[in-house]
Image (cartoon, coloured by chain):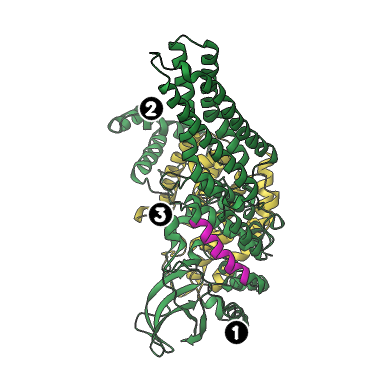
Amino acid sequence: MTVAVNPGSEEFRRATDLFFRALDVAPEQRDAFLVGACGSDTALLAQVRALLDAHVRNDKFLETPTHMMNPLAARKSYATPGDLIGKYKIERILGEGGMGVVYLAWDDGLGRHVAIKALSPAYTQDPNRRERFQREARAAAALSHPGIPRVHHFEEYAGDFFIVAEFIEGETLRPGITRGAASVASVIETASGIASVLAAAHDRGIVHRDLKPENVMRTPQGQIKILDFGLARLRDFNSTDDSLTAPGSVLGTPAYMAPEQIRHGSIDGRADLFALGILLHEMATGIHPFLARNPASTIARILETEAPPLGASSAGQSDGAGSAIMRAALDAIIRKCLRKAPEDRYSSAHELLAALDRARDGRGPSGAIPTGSPGPRQWWRVHHLVTCVAYGGLMVPMWMARQSIDPSGSGSRLGMVLFLATLGAAVASMVLRLHLLFTASSIPGQWVRQYRHATPWLRLSDSIAVLGFLVAGAALIVGNTHEGLAAVLICAGVITRLSFAVIEPATTRAAFDQDG
Amino acid sequence: MSELDDVGAMIEVTYAELHRIADGYLRREQHRSVQATELINEAYLRMAKGPAQHFQNRAHFVAIAAIAMRRLLVERARARHAAKRGGIQVQVTLNDAILRGGGESAVVDLIALDRALDDLARQDAEQARIVELRYFGGLSVEETAEAMNLSPATVKRHWTFAKAWLLVALEGQKHAGG
């Protein structure tokens, strides 16, 4: 036992110190260095040699934290392809989860595929628990909602318990999230699909409790189906019979649990809304808002940290001005779903659904035009009205300047053309601005679309008008006439241009949370 | 110092809970195989349900979770080991005491590691804590540095040495044990 480091702080310190000094030396000179450094202390030499050897030899040691490891135990196999469970022929495994295995099977009698979920014996061994579980699964099955797979019946086979349910084609939301951030419109659509299923279930007193991307499927027709409704209710039974099911009470990851679910386990439908908030955030950004490298940190984040804002849409999915407003509305909705206290969230899935409808129409959570406080909105109106008045007023010097613009003095045709072009552009800009003002106050639901349509034309007409002012001003200076008018026009051009570059985007953003 | 006292008190509170989880696990596992991740999530969740409200911050919470996890896993491994020794099988492969990470070289005997970690703590408590946070708590070097109020460079240095030291100690135990 010469290699082990003996207790004794002094020796330990010397070994540590020597270890790092030796690491700084080139590998081939290390031993010579050690022999020199240790002198007659052969015990120390042996220690440090062993430490360095261990360091070089085994770089994987302890590098995989315990929560990333798998115990050397196999999962139970309930059935293999070709087996008959009742009248169902097992074809293949569809998936595996904490609660058991899901198989694809063929129902020869009815000529259709079914999904068969084998439940881990932990849930079904005790007759009382199994009975309670069946009642729960039946209640969920009785929901008979198009967004919830139908449960055909229950089977017992070789002592195991199986749920036979409608087979849903399509994929879960997980692959989509893995591919990256989704467009705001598709997130809102998915959210509405999920919220309407949740609303129906919550109305019947059934809470999902384990909503996550893996449990939500989208059929090829685009319909949303939520899997495993009510099954997570099984966890509740643990509290009455703790010694039996403790580990089973956590199926997979706690990453979609609401704070109240983590803290005391007493929850209602609003916990599903929290989980939905995480799911939507993940869809919109491609990143789970609370997921950390280890479970403890994830839990701590769910309990304490606010989710990051959605931020600007990433490249490749910017679908115009309207999406920024929708994005802001979605951000507000997600934020409300993710409030730590259930009473701060939407009171029901119905309420969430209404908010999602408003967001889809380009309106904000309040029901009016998205967010923004009255102050900035007022400034936004003033800005557009002042711009309109200024355009009108500037037509006077333009009219006065038109005759002096032709530098050769041969006629005033060029001046007239310039005047008419500027007038046309200014009128177009005024009409568009008034249209936006009108839309904002009278038909807010249309605002996003109108804004998106009007913006390019508004920019074009403004640019032409500014160009008109500047050219007219420049012509007057060249012609050495009407210096006052020239100054007015050039100043107007510069100010107008600045206003479009600086003031207008700012006021629009402030008024509508929107990039102008 | 007060932080350490607090951690100690917290462990005592959560330990009974974790012990119960381990017991429940052992009694049931003939029926059902439980993945390590599930067990560990369970440990964390139980802790969060308990005195989570008193945790000063995330780092504090994670530190306690790491210690709790170490206890839970080692406890489990010991119980399994004892069961094997008492039974007909005298083979000491310690299947359950060993967790397999990536590759052959990452096989770790948890009971031996626990003992070696205690030895290390007597030499340098800080290093032992770093191993707890990194290995049982799953923290990165940066997270560990934050949790312990050390620089990442210091954590890395300690981690490097502690790993080598523990490996030597584990191999020493193996030889000593025959």
| Residue A179: image tag | 3
> Which SS class for mark 3?
helix
First in residue order: circle 2 vs circle 1: 2
Region rendered in magenta = A186-200
Chain A appears what colour?
green
> Farthest front residue?
A411
Mark 3 near mark 1, Cβ–Cβ under 8 Å? no
Chain letter for mark 3? A
Distance from disc 2 to disc 1, alpha carbons, whole Å, reads 72 Å
Chain colored yellow: B
Mark 2 sits on what residue? A37
Mark 2 near mark 1, Cβ–Cβ under 8 Å? no
Chain letter for mark 2? A
Q: Nearer the viewer, residue A483 or B166?
A: A483
Three-letter amino acid code of the residue under disc 2: Ala
- Discs 2 and 3 lie in a common subunit: yes
| Residue A127: image tag | 1
Which image quadrant for residue A248? bottom right
Q: Nearer the viewer, residue A437 or A133?
A: A437
* Rendering coords of residue B166 (x, y %): 45, 46
* Rendering coords of residue A9 (x, y %): 53, 36
Q: Residues within 10 Å of mark 3 (few under 14, many from 20)?
A: few
- Left/right of residue A61 with respect to residue B18 in the rendered view: left
